[in-house]
Amino acid sequence: MSKNEKTMGSAIEICHVGKKFPVAGGYFEALKDVHVTIPEGKFTILKGRSGSGKTTLLNIVGALDVPTSGKVLIGGREISSLGEKERDNLRRLRMGFVFQAVSLIPSLTAFQNVEFSLRLAGIRKGRRERVEECLKMVGLGNRMHHMPAEMSGGEQQRVAIARAIAHRPQILLADEPTAELDSAMAAQITRLLGELTRKEGVTILMTTHDTGLMDAGDMIIELENGNQVGVTMKEEAGTLAEEAAGGALAEEAAEKSVDETLAENVREILSRETSGKGGEPRA
Ligand SMILES: Nc1ncnc2c1ncn2[C@@H]1O[C@H](COP(=O)(O)OP(=O)(O)O)[C@@H](O)[C@H]1O
Ligand SMILES: [Mg+2]
Protein backbone atom coordinates (compact mmCIF):
# COMPACT_ATOMS: atom_id res chain seq x y z
CA MET A 1 0.00 0.00 0.00
CA SER A 2 1.45 3.38 -0.94
CA LYS A 3 1.42 6.38 1.31
CA ASN A 4 -1.43 7.96 -0.67
CA GLU A 5 -3.67 4.94 -0.34
CA LYS A 6 -3.43 4.67 3.39
CA THR A 7 -6.36 5.76 5.44
CA MET A 8 -6.12 7.71 8.65
CA GLY A 9 -7.02 5.88 11.82
CA SER A 10 -5.45 3.08 13.74
CA ALA A 11 -2.13 1.71 12.62
CA ILE A 12 -1.79 -1.20 15.00
CA GLU A 13 -4.60 -3.02 16.78
CA ILE A 14 -3.43 -5.27 19.59
CA CYS A 15 -6.42 -7.44 20.48
CA HIS A 16 -6.36 -9.42 23.73
CA VAL A 17 -2.80 -10.56 23.10
CA GLY A 18 -1.30 -13.16 25.42
CA LYS A 19 2.05 -14.88 25.18
CA LYS A 20 3.23 -17.96 27.03
CA PHE A 21 6.76 -19.29 26.70
CA PRO A 22 7.37 -22.94 27.42
CA VAL A 23 9.83 -23.32 30.26
CA ALA A 24 10.97 -26.32 32.28
CA GLY A 25 7.98 -27.73 34.12
CA GLY A 26 5.33 -25.56 32.43
CA TYR A 27 5.15 -22.15 30.84
CA PHE A 28 5.88 -18.54 31.61
CA GLU A 29 3.18 -16.00 30.87
CA ALA A 30 5.04 -12.99 29.46
CA LEU A 31 1.92 -11.12 28.23
CA LYS A 32 -1.57 -11.27 29.65
CA ASP A 33 -4.50 -9.95 27.65
CA VAL A 34 -2.90 -6.81 26.25
CA HIS A 35 -5.59 -4.87 24.41
CA VAL A 36 -4.82 -1.47 22.92
CA THR A 37 -5.03 0.41 19.64
CA ILE A 38 -2.10 2.46 18.46
CA PRO A 39 -3.01 5.51 16.38
CA GLU A 40 -1.54 6.19 12.99
CA GLY A 41 1.19 8.77 12.57
CA LYS A 42 1.82 9.19 16.29
CA PHE A 43 4.70 8.45 18.60
CA THR A 44 3.73 5.78 21.10
CA ILE A 45 5.99 4.77 23.96
CA LEU A 46 5.72 1.31 25.50
CA LYS A 47 7.14 1.63 28.96
CA GLY A 48 7.83 -0.80 31.75
CA ARG A 49 10.57 -2.27 33.88
CA SER A 50 12.98 -4.81 32.52
CA GLY A 51 11.11 -8.11 32.17
CA SER A 52 7.66 -6.49 31.89
CA GLY A 53 7.11 -7.88 28.38
CA LYS A 54 8.00 -4.94 26.13
CA THR A 55 10.27 -6.80 23.73
CA THR A 56 7.86 -9.72 23.57
CA LEU A 57 5.04 -7.39 22.52
CA LEU A 58 7.18 -5.45 20.05
CA ASN A 59 8.30 -8.70 18.41
CA ILE A 60 4.69 -9.80 18.03
CA VAL A 61 3.72 -6.45 16.48
CA GLY A 62 6.75 -6.71 14.18
CA ALA A 63 5.67 -10.18 12.99
CA LEU A 64 8.88 -11.62 14.40
CA ASP A 65 6.92 -13.75 16.86
CA VAL A 66 3.31 -14.94 17.19
CA PRO A 67 0.95 -14.52 20.14
CA THR A 68 -0.37 -17.57 22.01
CA SER A 69 -3.79 -15.92 22.21
CA GLY A 70 -5.37 -12.86 20.67
CA LYS A 71 -4.31 -11.17 17.46
CA VAL A 72 -2.59 -8.14 15.97
CA LEU A 73 -3.95 -6.15 13.05
CA ILE A 74 -1.78 -3.85 11.01
CA GLY A 75 -3.67 -1.46 8.78
CA GLY A 76 -6.75 -3.60 9.43
CA ARG A 77 -5.11 -6.94 8.44
CA GLU A 78 -4.43 -9.71 10.88
CA ILE A 79 -0.73 -10.48 10.69
CA SER A 80 -0.67 -13.92 12.29
CA SER A 81 -2.76 -15.28 9.44
CA LEU A 82 -0.19 -14.22 6.86
CA GLY A 83 2.12 -16.74 5.26
CA GLU A 84 5.87 -16.58 5.80
CA LYS A 85 6.47 -14.75 2.51
CA GLU A 86 3.79 -12.17 3.24
CA ARG A 87 5.19 -11.60 6.71
CA ASP A 88 8.64 -11.10 5.17
CA ASN A 89 7.24 -8.56 2.76
CA LEU A 90 5.35 -6.80 5.53
CA ARG A 91 8.56 -6.45 7.56
CA ARG A 92 10.75 -5.48 4.63
CA LEU A 93 8.43 -3.02 2.92
CA ARG A 94 6.10 -1.61 5.55
CA MET A 95 8.14 -1.71 8.72
CA GLY A 96 11.39 -0.30 9.99
CA PHE A 97 13.30 -1.62 12.99
CA VAL A 98 15.74 0.02 15.39
CA PHE A 99 17.33 -2.00 18.18
CA GLN A 100 19.22 -1.26 21.36
CA ALA A 101 22.52 -2.51 20.00
CA VAL A 102 23.17 -0.55 16.83
CA SER A 103 23.64 -3.06 14.04
CA LEU A 104 25.21 -1.07 11.23
CA ILE A 105 27.31 -2.90 8.69
CA PRO A 106 30.82 -1.95 9.88
CA SER A 107 32.44 -2.00 6.44
CA LEU A 108 29.91 0.43 4.93
CA THR A 109 29.69 4.21 5.37
CA ALA A 110 26.65 5.89 6.93
CA PHE A 111 25.39 6.63 3.41
CA GLN A 112 25.90 3.05 2.22
CA ASN A 113 24.22 1.62 5.32
CA VAL A 114 21.09 3.67 4.66
CA GLU A 115 21.22 2.97 0.93
CA PHE A 116 21.37 -0.74 1.68
CA SER A 117 17.92 -0.70 3.23
CA LEU A 118 16.53 0.95 0.09
CA ARG A 119 18.11 -1.81 -1.98
CA LEU A 120 16.47 -4.42 0.24
CA ALA A 121 13.12 -2.71 -0.25
CA GLY A 122 13.70 -2.79 -4.02
CA ILE A 123 13.72 1.00 -4.35
CA ARG A 124 15.87 2.21 -7.24
CA LYS A 125 14.56 5.61 -8.17
CA GLY A 126 15.77 8.66 -6.28
CA ARG A 127 17.86 6.54 -3.96
CA ARG A 128 20.73 8.96 -3.45
CA GLU A 129 18.40 11.88 -2.75
CA ARG A 130 16.37 9.88 -0.25
CA VAL A 131 19.49 8.65 1.59
CA GLU A 132 20.79 12.21 1.84
CA GLU A 133 17.39 13.49 2.95
CA CYS A 134 17.16 10.89 5.73
CA LEU A 135 20.69 11.45 7.00
CA LYS A 136 20.06 15.20 7.04
CA MET A 137 16.79 14.64 8.90
CA VAL A 138 18.66 12.94 11.72
CA GLY A 139 21.31 15.67 11.75
CA LEU A 140 24.07 13.74 10.01
CA GLY A 141 24.36 15.70 6.79
CA ASN A 142 28.03 16.18 7.58
CA ARG A 143 28.75 12.55 8.50
CA MET A 144 27.43 10.82 5.38
CA HIS A 145 30.70 9.23 4.41
CA HIS A 146 31.92 8.30 7.87
CA MET A 147 32.37 4.66 8.79
CA PRO A 148 30.42 3.43 11.84
CA ALA A 149 33.66 3.14 13.84
CA GLU A 150 34.29 6.84 13.18
CA MET A 151 31.02 7.87 14.80
CA SER A 152 29.80 8.19 18.39
CA GLY A 153 27.12 5.87 19.79
CA GLY A 154 24.49 8.60 19.37
CA GLU A 155 25.50 9.20 15.77
CA GLN A 156 25.45 5.48 14.97
CA GLN A 157 21.97 5.18 16.43
CA ARG A 158 20.86 8.12 14.28
CA VAL A 159 22.22 6.36 11.18
CA ALA A 160 20.20 3.31 12.26
CA ILE A 161 17.08 5.51 12.53
CA ALA A 162 17.74 7.03 9.08
CA ARG A 163 18.14 3.51 7.73
CA ALA A 164 14.91 2.37 9.35
CA ILE A 165 12.79 5.17 7.85
CA ALA A 166 14.44 5.52 4.42
CA HIS A 167 12.07 3.16 2.60
CA ARG A 168 9.10 5.10 4.05
CA PRO A 169 7.71 2.35 6.25
CA GLN A 170 4.29 2.86 7.76
CA ILE A 171 5.52 1.62 11.12
CA LEU A 172 8.82 2.09 12.91
CA LEU A 173 9.46 -0.26 15.82
CA ALA A 174 12.27 0.74 18.16
CA ASP A 175 13.27 -1.54 21.02
CA GLU A 176 15.11 0.42 23.72
CA PRO A 177 17.00 2.47 21.12
CA THR A 178 18.37 4.79 23.79
CA ALA A 179 19.45 2.26 26.40
CA GLU A 180 23.13 2.49 25.53
CA LEU A 181 23.26 6.28 25.35
CA ASP A 182 23.79 8.88 28.07
CA SER A 183 20.60 10.48 29.35
CA ALA A 184 20.92 13.75 27.42
CA MET A 185 21.52 11.92 24.15
CA ALA A 186 18.67 9.53 24.97
CA ALA A 187 16.31 12.50 25.36
CA GLN A 188 17.49 13.99 22.07
CA ILE A 189 17.00 10.74 20.16
CA THR A 190 13.55 10.33 21.68
CA ARG A 191 12.56 13.85 20.68
CA LEU A 192 13.93 13.23 17.20
CA LEU A 193 11.68 10.16 16.87
CA GLY A 194 8.68 12.25 17.93
CA GLU A 195 9.48 14.80 15.25
CA LEU A 196 9.89 12.12 12.60
CA THR A 197 6.28 11.07 13.15
CA ARG A 198 5.19 14.59 12.26
CA LYS A 199 7.64 15.05 9.41
CA GLU A 200 7.34 11.64 7.75
CA GLY A 201 3.90 10.55 8.96
CA VAL A 202 5.37 7.29 10.22
CA THR A 203 3.76 5.53 13.19
CA ILE A 204 6.41 4.89 15.84
CA LEU A 205 6.27 2.41 18.69
CA MET A 206 9.29 2.63 20.97
CA THR A 207 9.99 0.67 24.13
CA THR A 208 11.91 2.04 27.07
CA HIS A 209 12.40 1.39 30.78
CA ASP A 210 13.58 4.99 31.20
CA THR A 211 10.80 6.96 32.87
CA GLY A 212 12.59 10.21 32.01
CA LEU A 213 11.71 9.94 28.33
CA MET A 214 7.90 10.07 28.44
CA ASP A 215 7.46 13.73 27.47
CA ALA A 216 8.09 13.12 23.78
CA GLY A 217 5.38 10.47 23.41
CA ASP A 218 1.88 11.19 22.07
CA MET A 219 0.67 8.05 23.80
CA ILE A 220 2.15 5.99 26.63
CA ILE A 221 1.32 2.33 27.21
CA GLU A 222 2.58 0.87 30.46
CA LEU A 223 3.28 -2.79 31.07
CA GLU A 224 3.87 -4.45 34.43
CA ASN A 225 4.60 -8.16 34.66
CA GLY A 226 2.96 -8.72 31.29
CA ASN A 227 -0.16 -6.77 32.23
CA GLN A 228 -1.21 -3.57 30.54
CA VAL A 229 -1.56 -1.26 33.53
CA GLY A 230 -2.09 2.09 31.86
CA VAL A 231 -2.67 3.89 28.59
CA THR A 232 -2.20 7.65 28.52
CA MET A 233 -3.00 9.81 25.55
CA LYS A 234 -1.17 13.08 25.71
CA GLU A 235 -3.50 15.99 25.24
CA GLU A 236 -1.01 18.02 23.36
CA ALA A 237 -2.49 21.28 22.18
CA GLY A 238 -0.44 21.40 18.97
CA THR A 239 -1.32 17.91 17.85
CA LEU A 240 -5.00 18.21 18.65
CA ALA A 241 -5.29 21.62 17.05
CA GLU A 242 -3.57 20.30 13.97
CA GLU A 243 -6.00 17.41 13.76
CA ALA A 244 -9.01 19.56 14.44
CA ALA A 245 -8.06 22.16 11.87
CA GLY A 246 -6.92 19.70 9.24
CA GLY A 247 -6.59 22.49 6.68
CA ALA A 248 -3.67 23.28 4.46
CA LEU A 249 -2.79 26.39 6.43
CA ALA A 250 -2.64 24.50 9.70
CA GLU A 251 -0.56 21.82 8.03
CA GLU A 252 1.82 24.39 6.64
CA ALA A 253 2.19 26.08 10.01
CA ALA A 254 2.77 22.75 11.72
CA GLU A 255 5.30 21.74 9.07
CA LYS A 256 7.24 24.92 9.62
CA SER A 257 7.43 24.52 13.37
CA VAL A 258 8.49 20.89 12.97
CA ASP A 259 11.31 21.96 10.67
CA GLU A 260 12.35 24.62 13.12
CA THR A 261 12.30 22.23 16.07
CA LEU A 262 14.20 19.63 14.10
CA ALA A 263 16.84 22.16 13.14
CA GLU A 264 17.10 23.28 16.75
CA ASN A 265 17.54 19.73 17.97
CA VAL A 266 20.11 18.97 15.36
CA ARG A 267 22.09 22.10 16.26
CA GLU A 268 21.97 21.09 19.92
CA ILE A 269 23.13 17.54 19.18
CA LEU A 270 25.94 18.80 16.98
CA SER A 271 27.13 21.35 19.51
CA ARG A 272 27.18 18.65 22.20
CA GLU A 273 29.14 16.36 19.97
CA THR A 274 31.66 18.91 18.78
CA SER A 275 32.26 19.89 22.41
CA GLY A 276 33.14 16.24 23.00
CA LYS A 277 30.31 15.40 25.39
CA GLY A 278 27.84 13.74 23.06
CA GLY A 279 26.98 10.19 22.30
CA GLU A 280 29.19 8.53 24.88
CA PRO A 281 29.54 6.23 26.50
CA ARG A 282 28.55 3.04 24.72
CA ALA A 283 27.94 0.20 27.12
N1 LIG B 1 11.90 -17.22 24.90
C1 LIG B 1 11.56 -17.05 26.18
N2 LIG B 1 11.37 -18.12 27.00
C2 LIG B 1 11.01 -17.94 28.28
N3 LIG B 1 10.80 -16.75 28.86
C3 LIG B 1 10.98 -15.65 28.12
C4 LIG B 1 11.37 -15.74 26.74
N4 LIG B 1 11.45 -14.49 26.25
C5 LIG B 1 11.15 -13.67 27.28
N5 LIG B 1 10.86 -14.35 28.38
C6 LIG B 1 10.48 -13.80 29.68
O1 LIG B 1 9.36 -12.96 29.50
C7 LIG B 1 9.46 -11.80 30.32
C8 LIG B 1 9.35 -10.57 29.47
O2 LIG B 1 10.51 -10.47 28.65
P1 LIG B 1 10.76 -9.24 27.69
O3 LIG B 1 9.61 -9.11 26.78
O4 LIG B 1 12.09 -9.45 27.07
O5 LIG B 1 10.77 -8.04 28.73
P2 LIG B 1 11.31 -6.54 28.55
O6 LIG B 1 11.61 -6.32 27.13
O7 LIG B 1 10.21 -5.68 29.09
O8 LIG B 1 12.53 -6.44 29.41
C9 LIG B 1 10.78 -11.90 31.04
O9 LIG B 1 10.55 -12.37 32.35
C10 LIG B 1 11.57 -12.91 30.24
O10 LIG B 1 12.45 -13.63 31.04
MG1 LIG C 1 13.36 -5.73 26.17
Image: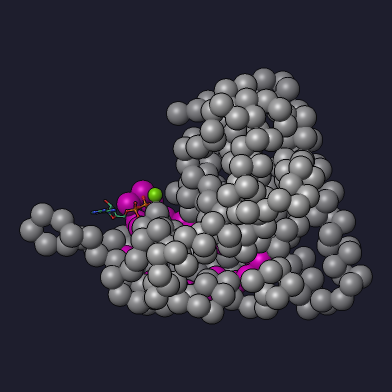
Up-down relation of residue 168 to residue 70 (above or below): above
Q: Position of residue 277 (x, y in %)?
A: 64, 23
Q: Position of residue 232 (x, y in %)?
A: 54, 68
Q: How is the image coloured?
A: one colour
Query: Which is more toward the observer, 279 or 149?
Result: 149
Q: Which residue is drawn at the image coordinates 57% and 30% (left, top)?
A: 153
Q: Position of residue 215 (x, y in %)?
A: 62, 54
Q: Quadrant of residue 95?
A: bottom right
Furthest toward the right, the residue is: 249
Write the start and end of the magenta stretch as one range.
Answer: 31-53
Inspect this view and state whether residue 173 appears: yes
Inspect this view and state whether residue 33 appears: no
Q: How many marks?
A: 0
Q: Which quarter of the image is occupied by the N terminus?
A: bottom right
Q: Is residue 94 magenta?
A: no
Query: Which is more toward the observer, 207 or 2?
Result: 2
Q: Position of residue 135 (x, y in %)?
A: 72, 40
Q: Main secondary structure of the magenta part?
A: strand
Q: Quadrant of residue 242?
A: bottom right
Q: Is residue 267 left or right of residue 88?
A: right
Q: Is residue 63 left or right of residue 157?
A: left
Q: Which residue is drawn at the image coordinates 78% and 50% (left, top)?
A: 126
Q: Which residue is drawn at the image coordinates 70% and 63% (left, top)?
A: 201
Q: Is residue 253 left or right of residue 129?
A: right
Q: Which quarter of the image is occupied by the C terminus?
A: top left
Query: Which is more toward the observer, 84 or 113?
Result: 84
Q: Is residue 39 magenta?
A: yes
